[in-house]
Amino acid sequence: MDAINEVKMLAAKKGLTLTYLAKYLSEHSDRKYSLDTLSKKLRANMIRYFEMKIIAQALDMDLVFLERK
């Protein structure tokens, strides 16, 4: 699954929108995000790790790496 669909699915499960996530990113980083900016980054798979950490925080989730079994 690509980044935009994954984030949209997780946001929808929490009752949130990409607009909300863009606003949250702006409030919790030193950059300004719009819906368009966030959507483009997700579609192009150009989202940065620190941005995904903030998105995970907004979704009340943890971003983790698990070792494969």
Image: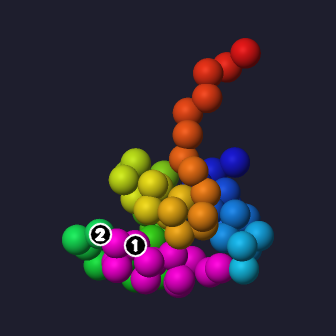
The answer to whether residue 4 of the structure is visible from this angle is no
For the residues bearing labels 1 and 2, Cβ distance under 8 angstroms: yes
Name the residue furthest right. Answer: 13
The answer to whether residue 64 of the structure is visible from this angle is yes
Q: Label 2 belongs to which residue?
A: 29
On the image, the x and y values in percent for residue 5 come to 67, 61
Under circle 1, the secondary element is: helix
Q: Label 1 belongs to which residue?
A: 25
Who's the residue at 73% across and 65% down the image?
Answer: 9
On the image, the x and y values in percent for residue 30 come to 22, 71
On the image, the x and y values in percent for residue 24 come to 44, 78
Under circle 2, the secondary element is: loop
- 14 sits to left or right of 21: right
Q: CA distance from mark 1 to mark 2?
A: 6 Å
- 22 sits to left or right of 17: left
Q: Is residue 68 above or below residue 19?
A: above
The magenta stretch spans which residues? 16-28
Q: Is residue 8 magenta?
A: no
Label 1 amino acid? Leu
How packed mark 2 is, by other alpha carbons closer than 10 Å (few <14, some 14-19, many 20 or more), is: few
Q: Is residue 9 above or below residue 27?
A: above
Who's the residue at 62% across and 81% down the image?
Answer: 17
Label 2 amino acid? Ser
Q: Is residue 12 above or below residue 1?
A: below
How many numbered markers are drawn?
2
On the image, the x and y values in percent for residue 40 come to 46, 68
How packed mark 1 is, by other alpha carbons closer than 10 Å (few <14, some 14-19, many 20 or more), is: many
